């Protein structure tokens, strides 16, 4: 029986293993984050900009694309991290038996799972960097504070990576991931202040949306791109850290239960 709860820097060996696999197919992994913002900006940003004269966000009037483009950075972080620790981690665990091989080494369950979550956050940073380059080139990230998107993406990646791993720990088949994707992730994508300010929602819905992690991640990426990071931004960062602090232990407990025999 595996009962060792030790945790050490050995988790970096698993992180490096995932990085090596990623580098072998980096073109396939790198292109979508580059092309995705262009598709969204063309479909929603440029398309709606002719219909919406301006958007008011926290008392500031701006064009729709100035409001919308930075929020796509947050959405990309969410999707990249969550999908990496849900579908991809499940494939490594259930189909490829990678976790079984790793557990035959001195690695512990905690080290493997933390490495998976950190790798999900790393994937989010890589995607955010690629997308930021596109958004900045189009003029929607004019402030030097936009560089803060990278550490923000890592924090958001830890949050959504931990959420994905928590679902992986209780999911019996890969098809079951449709439930959290369509009932949790997609609603967050649509109603967390990404496509429109929360002031466009009823008061009860706006209050609920303001508690979601993607809302706070979008607040941070938008503030960074527009050069508006300040003391108030610490509150959103604290919310993301709180979600990570809850879901990382849940992931560890759930995966120990699933993997320890």
Image (spheres, rainbow, N blue to C red):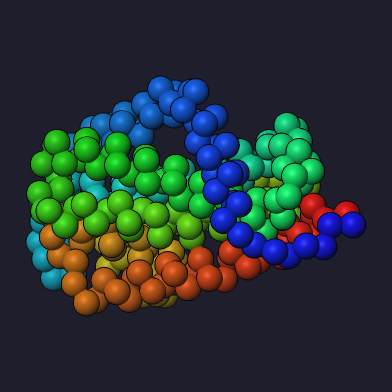
> Which quadrant is the N terminus positioned in?
bottom right
The number of numbered discs placed on residues in the rendered structure image is 0
Q: Is residue 27 above or below residue 8?
A: above
Q: Quadrant of the C terminus?
A: bottom right
Residue 92 image offset from top left, x and y in percent: 68, 37
Residue 138 seen by the camera:
yes
Q: Is residue 145 above or below residue 105?
A: below
Relative side of 201 to 172, left or right = left
Residue in the picture at 43% in, 26% down:
26
For the point 44% across and 69% down, the residue is: 241
The spot of residue 77 in percent (x, y) is 40, 48
Rendered image quadrant of residue 174: top right
| Residue nearer the viewer, 22 or 94 | 22
Q: Is residue 36 left or right of residue 168?
A: left
**In the image, what residue occupies the spot 24% across and 76% down?**
232
The answer to whether residue 183 of the structure is visible from this angle is no
Front position in the image: 177 or 1: 1
> Quarter of the image holding residue 29?
top left
Give the x, y percent position of residue 30: 38, 29
Residue placed most toward the observer, 158 or 198: 158
* Viewer-proximal residue among 255 and 213: 255
Above or below 216: residue 93: above
Residue 205 appears at what percent x and percent y?
Answer: 42, 69
Residue at the spot x=30%, y=51% of the render?
Answer: 150
């Amino acid at each position: 029986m595996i009962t060792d709860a030790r945790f050490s820097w050995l988790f970096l060996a698993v992180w490096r293993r995932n990085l090596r696999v990623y580098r072998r197919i980096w073109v396939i992994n790198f292109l979508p984050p580059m092309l995705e913002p262009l598709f969204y900006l063309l479909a929603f940003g440029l398309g709606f900009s002719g219909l919406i004269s301006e958007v008011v966000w926290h008392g500031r009037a701006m064009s729709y694309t100035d409001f919308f483009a930075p929020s796509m950075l947050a959405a990309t972080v969410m999707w990249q991290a969550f999908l990496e620790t849900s579908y991809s981690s499940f494939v490594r665990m259930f189909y490829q038996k990678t976790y079984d091989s790793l557990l035959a080494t001195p690695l512990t369950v905690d080290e493997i799972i933390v490495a998976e979550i950190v790798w999900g956050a790393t994937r989010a940073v890589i995607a955010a960097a690629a997308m930021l380059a596109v958004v900045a080139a189009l003029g929607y990230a004019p402030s030097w504070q936009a560089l803060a998107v990278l550490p923000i993406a890592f924090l958001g990646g830890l949050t959504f990576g931990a959420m994905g791993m928590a679902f992986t720990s209780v999911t019996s088949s890969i098809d079951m991931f449709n439930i959290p994707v369509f009932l949790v992730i997609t609603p967050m994508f649509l109603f967390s202040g990404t496509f429109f300010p929360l002031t466009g929602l009823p008061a009860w819905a706006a209050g609920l949306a303001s508690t979601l992690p993607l809302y706070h991640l979008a607040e941070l990426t938008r503030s960074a791109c527009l050069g508006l990071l300040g003391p108030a931004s610490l509150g959103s960062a604290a919310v993301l850290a709180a979600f990570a602090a809850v879901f990382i232990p849940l992931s560890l407990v759930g995966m120990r239960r699933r993997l320890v025999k």
